[in-house]
Amino acid sequence: MATVSISKQLLTKVLSSYIILTFIVAAVQLGYTYVTVKNQIIEDLKQLEQTINVSLTQAVWDISDIQVSAIGQGIAAMSLVRAVIITEESHQVMYQSGELDGFDTKKFLTPSSTTLQHNDLFGYSTSLIYDFSSNSSFGSSNTIGHIAIFSSDELVFQKVGAQMLFPVIGAVFSIILLSFLIKRLFRNLLTTPLETLSHGIARIDLENLGQARLNPPSSQQDELTTLANSFNLMLVKLEEYNASLEQTKLKLVNANQQLDRQNVYLEQEVTKKTANLSQAITELAQQKNELEESEQELLASLTQLKETQTQLVQSEKMASLGSLVAGISHEINTPVGIGVTAVSYLSECVRTLDEKINDKTLTQKYMTKFIEDANSGCALLTTNLNKASQLIQSFKDIAVDQTSEAVRDVNIHQYLHEVITSLQPKLKRTQHKIEIEGADDIVIHCRAGALSQVFTNMILNSLIHAFDKVEQGVMTFKLKHDDEHVFIEYHDNGSGINQESLDLLFEPFFTTKRGQGGSGLGTHILYNIVTQSLHGEIYATSELGHGLNYFIKFPKPKGIVEQELEQQGKGINKKEA
Ligand SMILES: Nc1ncnc2c1ncn2[C@@H]1O[C@H](COP(=O)(O)OP(=O)(O)O)[C@@H](O)[C@H]1O
Ligand SMILES: [Mg+2]
């Protein structure tokens, strides 16, 4: 698209507006001048008519055609007059000159004064009034004729033309001058600086922005100067931007290089890691196999461990049985020893008696002494054999209970005494005491061995652990019961244990005497017997230095008859169901 300069555009627009405006003003002025000139001419015509009015009226009154014609010609000769018509009162034309074809005198010439228009002629008509009062006895005035004087539009135009010539020439001249001036001004103020700017901008070289700097196009601080300054500012910003772009480019190149290096490194790492990974996978598979094997082994060990635990529990039982046996042999030793001494003393007495009989030295006195000795020997023998027999019986009961699963009626109070008797070998040489309080009439149908193990474990643990450093320990049993349950409370006033040990007390293999004969199974067995064999509950409390307490509660086992009845009841229920 071809460029059209701003100054040209402005010039065209400003000038055309100016010309249109000038034309409008000129047209208004022309119209105004036309009307003014025309009115002026009509005024002049009136003036003329007034000048000749008296003489013409007189001439018409006198009906002097010659005089009327002379006056008419005189008027017609005037430069601004184009036509004249003079009539009598009856509209009979007395004089006429100019182009008045088709002018109807009756229509236009009225008794009053008026302006007229006929074709391109315009004019003024008035009536000729004769004043009778001055020279006759009529005593009034009257219309005696009419006169109409015409000028033409052409004359008006001529006058207007003459009046408008100079203003029009002035306007045209001023338009030319103005256009020249405006063009010059526009060129100086706008086009040239703009061209300078656009050349400057066109010169922009991104590589050398400094060169494209613009000088302010004018010394004045105007919009173009601001534009140039802004452009220069933009160049500075561009330079800065270029610099930062350059730096970013450099960084980018660096980063790219680093990225390439890292890529290479990463690829190497990936290769290495892949190798490692496959090795790790192989190792993992191996480990899995090994784990599976060790799991098998662990399972086997667990089974073995369980077996061992059962064995250990068994051997713990056996151990207490062993100590029982040791006790038996120790306890029976004394009465049997006394018995043996008594028997040998008796056989010695018998042998002496036999000798005395053979020697025939037997006296009455000796015989009496022999019988006394024999009697006391026999008595000693009987007492000690009875004692031994009693001991054996009680040991036998406990031992049988401990090894058999037999269920029988047990009086807890009595049975506790029997257990304590069986533990005499351990208690005898100490100063510890066992006290039994509470009900002595609790009889339950249960596995006596279970009960004996419960009591034995509690007493032995107190002897071994609680009274380790105590001379005169006291162990107390409290026996209670209601319709449903049996309650056994046990207390020793020994060393007690701390909270940490208390939490582990019933755990299997927990012992503070490992390597000194402790297996850590005693309390575990105790717990299992109470909870499983006796279907009860047990808990322990203790405080370091204040002894240890057990609280046992278990339901009274039902007698055989009741159990059988219950079994039958269940059978019936099942059948019904
Ligand atoms: N009456 C008690 N007084 C103090 N400590 C006790 C008592 N009874 C048990 N213990 C503690 O509980 C631990 C576990 O007892 P137990 O299971 O019978 O194993 P063991 O007697 O073989 O050590 C004992 O090692 C001891 O530390
Ligand atoms: Mg123990």
Image: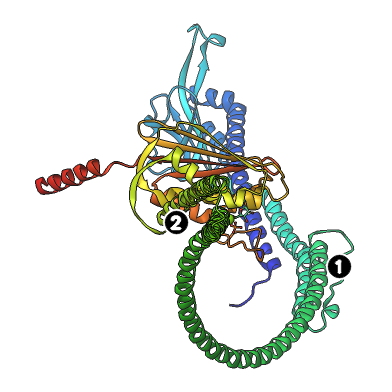
Q: Amino acid at mark 1?
A: Pro
Q: Nearer the viewer, residue 446 or 24?
A: 446
Q: Is residue 212 left or right of residue 92?
A: right
Q: Is residue 280 left or right of residue 302?
A: right
**Mark on residue 517?**
none
Give the residue furthest to the front. Answer: 360
Quadrant where ligand 2 appears: bottom right
Instruction: Name the residue that disc number 1 marks.
Output: 216
- Earlier residue among tags 2 and 1: 1
Q: Nearer the viewer, residue 330 or 313?
A: 330
Asked whether the viewer can see residue 182, the reply is yes
Q: Which residue occupies 64% across, 75% down?
A: 3
Q: Which residue occupies 78% across, 62% down?
A: 181
Seen in the picture, residue 246 relative to 50 is either above or below; the reply is below
Seen in the picture, residue 191 relative to 56 is either above or below; the reply is below
Nearer to us: label 2 or label 1: 2
Name the quadrant containing residue 11.
bottom right
Residue 429: where, in percent of width, then height? 66, 49
Seen in the picture, residue 176 relative to 61 is either above or below; the reply is below
Give the residue furthest to the right. Answer: 219
